[in-house]
Image (tube, helix red, strand yellow):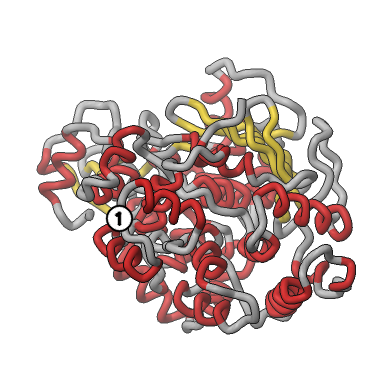
Amino acid sequence: MHTDTEACVRAVQSKDARFDGWFFTAVLTTRIYCRPSCPVVPPKVRNMTFYPSAAACQQAGFRACKRCRPDTSPGSPEWNARADSVARAMRLIRDGVVDREGVTGLAARLGYSARQIERQLLAELGAGPLALARAQRAQTARLLIETTDLPLAEVAFAAGFSSIRTFNETVREVFALAPGELRTRAARTPLAPATPGVIALRLPYRAPLNPSNLFGHLAATAVPGTEEWRDGAYRRTLTLPYGHGIVALTPQPGHIACRLSLTDPRDLTQAISRCRWLLDLDADPVAVDDRLRTDPLLAPLVESGPGRRVPRTVDGAEFAVRAVLGQQVSTAAARTHAARLVTAHGVPVDDPEGGLTHLFPTPEALAGLDPETLALPRTRRTTLTTLVAALADGTLRLGTDTDWERARTELSALPGFGPWTVEAIAMRALGDPDAFLPTDLGIRRAAERLSLPATPASLTARAADWRPWRAYAVQYLWTVDNHPINHLPA
């Protein structure tokens, strides 16, 4: 969008927050870059230039605005709606892969050379993978500086910097303040008392957001021991690269309140990324709803509760296992089966609030599972053990960097994987916004009540008008049925 100067100028002059993250405005006279919704008086048009990423602004020598804090704006929804190499690279960079594995590790995950990835990112974002990762490190550093009492030396390494000198130089360059000055500036604003060992932050999103189906679905399908709904918050355990964590997510007006407890602060970047992915916070609800409103049968559903998101998962392999356990059984039965796996094979954790007890078991932990111990039909046991084996040995990969169509092909080749299971994984684990579940019971009931075609083939043909947002259409169709997934728990 940054190449459409007229559209960008209109968004800046109207302070339209819907475009935060789509592009960044750099002011030539002040050498400062802002988000489109910056509250200051818009600069003259001749002094504006536009960039596709914060990293590109920083590379061009611009500093982040201290008023609108463009480093905290929601991420571009474009990366969630695409499955090409650039979009997959951006999702991996957001997960901190460059910090942990370098550019060569990023390229290896995508199946390209480092030079190819560099060239593609430069062409589309105006910055290479190192610059993009540097911008994210700066954002994480600012978050830790302003919201925790960690010593600044620990902040540097927790944010992914290789040295304190690089940390100091980057913070000064990006924010025009030294790390200590950033902390002093933040301390002027009284904050709520912090809980020792807990990082509290706000996760921004593009309005509107309807929390009913999002948190209702997560709470209704929560696996005891690993997830829970407590005091208005969805809580769960997280398996992370350097350790584990516990997160509490609470819907609030204008943001999601996030409280993270991590065994290693170096996992902060990926923990935040997983929470945003879980709640689909980088979606563009206006674009989605505008498309779905064009169908007269869907329009009333959209109008009654706009801004529905697709509830995703923090781990693709975990959701695939849970999808198999949920085949042809009720939500309650699926939770029971998953809870047994968690108790028998999950790693125990300590939860100060007492409700969470284990991490969800990894494929490696389930690889030696005795199928005879599973209270499942024999064919379902075979499906589960085959899936776990493929995930454990790396034959099958289900992550934010996975090619959607390739994953569908590989899943369909496994025994017991029909269209419902494959599309459910594509929708919630892989994040394909166009995944569709025409054979789902809730969708069939909605189709009957709305006079939509009854057979899966005819319904799929009818749903062509909803593309590329059929996964969001599923969320609206599910609201026709009075199921707990559509309501926030009392």
Residue 73 vertical position relative to residue 328 in the rendered view, above or below:
above
Looking at the rendering, which quadrant does residue 444 occupy? Answer: bottom left
Q: Nearer the viewer, residue 77 or 149?
A: 77
SS of the residue under disc 1: loop
Residue 448 image point, x, y percent:
38, 51
Question: Which quadrant would the N terminus be assigned to in this image?
Answer: bottom left
Residue 57 image point, x, y percent:
33, 51
Q: Residue at x 73, y 47 (%)?
A: 223
Q: Residue at x 62, y 81 (%)?
A: 414
Q: Nearer the viewer, residue 171 or 36?
A: 36
Question: Which quadrant would the C terminus be assigned to in this image?
Answer: top right
Q: Nearer the viewer, residue 146 or 355?
A: 355
Residue 489 image point, x, y percent:
60, 30
Label 1: how many Cα within 10 Å (few below 14, some 14–19, many 20+)? many
- Is residue 58 shown left or right of residue 338? left
Residue 482 vertical position relative to residue 455 in the rendered view, above or below:
above
One can see residue 392 in this view: no
Q: Residue at x 67, y 34 (%)?
A: 229
- Is residue 385 shown left or right of residue 37? right
Looking at the rendering, which quadrant does residue 323 occupy? Answer: bottom right
Amino acid carrying label 1: it is Pro
Q: Residue at x 59, y 75 (%)?
A: 417
Q: Nearer the viewer, residue 62 or 11?
A: 11
One can see residue 482 in this view: yes
Residue on which the image places disc 1:
52
